[in-house]
Amino acid sequence: MYKLLKLLTVAVFLIGGLLLSSCSSSPSDEELKQLSDLKNQVSSLEDNIRKLQSDAAALEKQIADKNGTLKQCQSDQDAVKKAMGK
């Protein structure tokens, strides 16, 4: 019986200590600043992603244009070879 009472007392103190030291209902100024900094960083990274996606689209368009020019040159070259009898 004494062991049970002792264990119960220790448990009550531990639970009481945890409850007293638990998280507060509102964030601290430091936590708010960290959150604001993280939001700014996320916004900056999202802007960077949009810029890089735009750059990638422009490069893909350039590649498509170059491939079109290359196909036209190959077609012209084949026509010249055919006209020369080769």
Image (cartoon, helix red, strand yellow):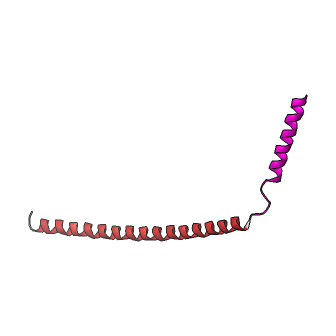
Image coordinates of residue 41 in percent, x first then y, are 58, 68
Q: On screen, 22 above or below 32?
A: above
Tell me what residue is drawn at x 74 percent, y 65 percent: 28
Image coordinates of residue 57 in percent, x first then y, are 43, 68
Q: Is residue 74 magenta?
A: no
Taken as a whole, is the magenta stretch helix, strand or loop?
A: helix
Tell me what residue is drawn at x 79 percent, y 53 percent: 22
Residue 35 occupies quadrant: bottom right
Along the horizontal axis of the image, is 22 left or right of 41?
right
Along the horizontal axis of the image, is 10 left or right of 86?
right
Tell me what residue is drawn at x 85 percent, y 47 percent: 16
Along the horizontal axis of the image, is 1 left or right of 43?
right
Q: Which residues are magenta?
A: 1-27
Image coordinates of residue 46 in percent, x first then y, are 55, 67
Residue 32 occupies quadrant: bottom right
- Tell me the quarter of the image containing the C terminus: bottom left
